[in-house]
Image: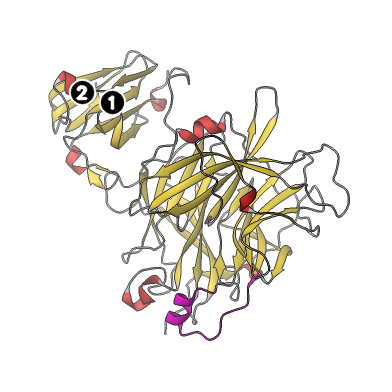
Amino acid sequence: MPRNYPNLTQAADLPSAGGGINTDTTQVVNLEATFRRIRARAEYLSVRDGGQFAGTRYTVRAANHHGFLNHFQGILRLRDGKHLLISGSDWEKDTRNSHIFVIKMASRPAEGFWGSNIMFNKKPPGEDTVVKTIGIDKQLWHPGGMDVLGDLVVVPIEQGTNETVRRVAKAGPADPKHSKIVFFNMTDPQKPKFFKDCFIDRPDVKAGAAALTKLQTDYFLLAVWSDSDALPPRLDFYLSDEPTFPSPFTREPTTWFPEQVATLEGQTPTFGNFQALNFVRQKGENNEEQLYLVGFRKADGFNLAELYTIDIEEDTNPPEPGKGIELPNITKVATRAFQDNKYCDMAGASGLYVEPNTGKPIIYSSHQFRRKEGILRLSEFSVPKSKGEGEVTDLKDSWVELFEESHFKGRFLRLFDLSANHATIRDYSKVRAQGETFNDKVSSVRYQIPEGVTYQLYDDKNFKKDILPLPGRGTIVEMGELENRGLAGEVSSSRLI
């Protein structure tokens, strides 16, 4: 019999959350253009499991039914910039539970993108680890995609009826469809609080993903990807009773069906089978706001993020008692396909984070299972810096991007904070980019270094045979074809000079 999860705390035993929670949201500028620039290739990260798992749970080993009964479901980077949440479902009869795993990325910066933490080592730093396990509900064992608003995290949990899972688990008749929407206060991610008296109970309805935002009236809007016997899959929109949290959600939901989706030219009218949903707000030049929804899924072998505008009546007056929102107009405006790899699976855990300082979106995804040596694998998809974003005067803000193919394509190695972090690399054969070594692989370069400073690329390891200086100009410099210089695939070490 598998042992139970060490250090597990049931949500009901967490401190009860009260009011006063931060529900501010970071707004983006020109989201549609920025969304289309998110890199299709990820930087890889790993996390140690911290001894938080029961036996072989959440692996694909034979002792764990090859992973049929438990896998990761959702992922969020929290507002403090140093913590992740990963949700997971476990239907093993002896350990059945819906879970949240709290991860501290202590080696990574609190601001901006993280970058790979396994560039120089196959295993992550010891301080990047799972630090807490929360059991949400033993009956509603399947959590869907999560969302976060400030420090307020929303998690849909449900019973699943997958017949393959039932056969492997040797379970009886299918569970009735049932779901709940629950909320956590993650102001201190290592000391979370649970809103015990604030939830939405949904008998006879499943909940695959949930997204949360705050309207201009300060009332909360919740969108839930729903499925039931009575109605086909759809979005149910819930409006809070009050403009402060915690607030009940007793108003009747507004139901929107996927066949109502509109599209911009060039987009296919698809909406559905999402593993995660995230609301994003954009503020325009004249302070007008636009609400967006990002959905993550996998289709035909491709990891996909799809962007939709959500147009609803956002009256500045409080809503009428008992009345929900008007039926929204939803338009698909953009689609991004991402590289399939061993560190990412958008059929499982995915989520969007908006960086507070820049307002840029960063997408995180994880593999559905941990490795047998106790490692969780993650991907980070970020937006490259563009030429119009100002000069660099501090070496801490410097960066160099080296690409395997001409014109900034293929695998890439990103070096940043050349004052310390990647100032010296003696041997590129010991450097890993997207899972493989990067020795003699450079065919194009982008960089931004303060004026008066030079970063030198060398043909051999240990700084022998200098071949290409990268003199700082403060602005972004691009070299799209090193082959024209006779230098393609020649870099084996680099350093500041």
Q: Is residue 423 located in the magenta-colored stretch of the structure?
A: no
For marks 2 and 1, the one nearer the N-term is 1
Q: Name the disc covering residue 482, or none.
A: 2
Q: Name which residue type carries label 1.
A: Val
Q: Secondary structure at mark 1?
A: strand
Above or below, 168 against 422 in this view is below
**Which residue sits furthest right?**
321
* Residue 33 x, y percent position in the rendering: 51, 30
Q: Name which residue type carries label 2.
A: Leu
Part of the protein shown in magenta:
161-178
Q: Give the quarter of the figure containing the C terminus.
A: top left
Above or below, 27 against 206 in this view is above
Residue lying at 35% horizontally and 64% vertically, measured from the top left: 374
Q: Secondary structure at mark 2?
A: helix
- In the foreground, 159 or 6: 159
Q: Is residue 150 toward the left or the right of residue 59 in the image?
A: right
The answer, for residue 188, to whether it is visible in the render is no
Q: Is residue 58 toward the left or the right of residue 176 in the image?
A: left
- How many dots with numbers? 2
Disc 1 designates what residue?
Answer: 445
Give the quadrant of residue 299: bottom left
* Residue 424 x, y percent position in the rendering: 25, 32
* Residue 46 x, y percent position in the rendering: 37, 53
Q: Is residue 240 toward the left or the right of residue 38 in the image?
A: right
Above or below, 474 against 315 in this view is above
Residue lying at 68% horizontally and 46% vertically, measured from the top left: 213
Give the quadrant of residue 466: top left
Whether residues under marks 2 and 1 lie with C-beta atoms below 8 angstroms apart, the answer is yes
Q: Is residue 163 located in the magenta-colored stretch of the structure?
A: yes
Give the quadrant of residue 445: top left
Distance from Cα at disc 2 to Cα at disc 1: 8 Å
Within-10-Å neighbours for mark 2: few <14, some 14–19, many 20+: some
